[in-house]
Image (cartoon, rainbow, N blue to C red):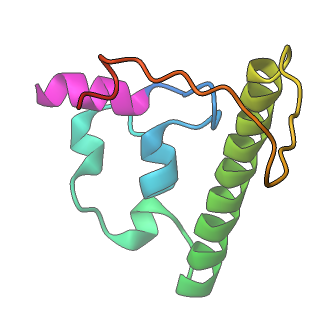
Amino acid sequence: MPHVEFAYSRVVHSTTKFCPFKIVYGFKPSAPIDLLPLPMQERMNFDASKRAEFVKKLYDRAREKIEKMIRLYEQHANKGRKKMLFEPGDLVWVHLRKDRFPE
């Protein structure tokens, strides 16, 4: 199971265009041994403020891509729908199926 999890976490996802390892650790490991604790200067040659800025920019880019995909999915789902506004007192038809609303 750990090998499957590692393989899944290395795959670039279509929504974020990043792999989960890139988002969590800041790099994409090629083997599980790459995840062993290494001295910070070997993993990334940043001081703390540069590392924090790098992670913040990475998270912001991932969030922007997720929001963009949400808008695309929303447009596709709402393609054939009309916006309906109801006012208090309007008559509407409500159909309650027995299997969804048991007594």
Where residue 99 sits: x, y (%)? 29, 17
Drawn side of residue 56 relative to residue 23, left or right: right
Residue shown at 72%/32% (left/top)? 92
Q: Quadrant of residue 42?
A: bottom left
Residue shown at 41%/30% (left/top)? 10
In the displayed structure, 48 sits above or below 61; it is below
Q: Is residue 92 magenta?
A: no
Where residue 58 sits: x, y (%)? 65, 57
Drawn side of residue 35 relative to residue 18, left or right: left
Where residue 87 sits: x, y (%)? 85, 51
Give the magenta part as a residue range: 1-10
Residue shown at 65%/33% (left/top)? 17
Q: Nearer the viewer, residue 23 or 66?
A: 66
Quadrant assignment for the C terminus: top left
- Report the magenta stretch's main SS: helix
Q: Quadrant of residue 14?
A: top right
Q: Is residue 4 magenta?
A: yes
In the displayed structure, 50 sits above or below 90; it is below
Q: Nearer the viewer, residue 59 or 74?
A: 74
Where residue 24 sits: x, y (%)? 43, 55
Q: Nearer the viewer, residue 78 or 96?
A: 96
Residue shown at 71%/37% (left/top)? 70
